[in-house]
Image (cartoon, rainbow, N blue to C red):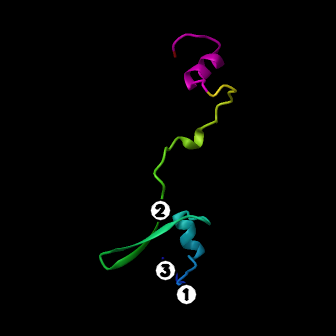
Amino acid sequence: MAASSTISSKGQITVPIEIRNRLGLHPGDRVEFCVEGGRTILRPIREEGNAFEQFIGALPCDDPNTTAVDFWRELRGHEDDL
């Protein structure tokens, strides 16, 4: 895939939509430019974080101290081990 852009007087470029889509880039995302083996590579900077953070608060529960095990026990209507 080849795409091009023009560098502005401030050194800014517009990343073509095809490249943004392919890399999953959105406004405010950070990218890095790396030179590897004579090639310049543009790649997104991905924050290393907890992969499960997106699920925090997904269980319908009023008590923040309730665990998933407690939730399932209550949902099933018994206190037996899962």
> Residue 28: x, y in percent?
60, 65
Residue 11, x across and y down, in percent? 52, 84
The answer to whether residue 53 is magenta is: no
Instruction: Write down the region rendered in magenta.
Output: 65-81
Residue under label 1, please give it: 6
Q: Residue at x 49, y 68 (%)?
A: 31
> Is the residue 48 above or below the residue 25 in the image?
above
Crowd rating for badge 3 (residues with CA inside 10 Å; few <14, some 14–19, many 20+): few
Tell me the kind of residue under disc 1.
Thr
- Residue at image mark 2: 45
Q: Residues within 10 Å of mark 2 (few under 14, many from 20)?
A: few
Q: Is residue 67 magenta?
A: yes
Q: Residue furthest left?
A: 37
Tell me the amino acid under the disc marked 2.
Ile
Please indicate whether residue 21 sits to the left or right of residue 43 in the image. right
- The extreme bottom residue here reads 9
| Residue that mark 3 sits on | 2
**Do the residues bearing badges 2 and 1 touch, measured as CB atoms within 8 Å?**
no
- 63 to 35, vertically: above or below: above
Could you say which is closer to the camera, residue 23 or residue 47? 47
Q: CA distance from mark 1 to mark 3?
A: 14 Å
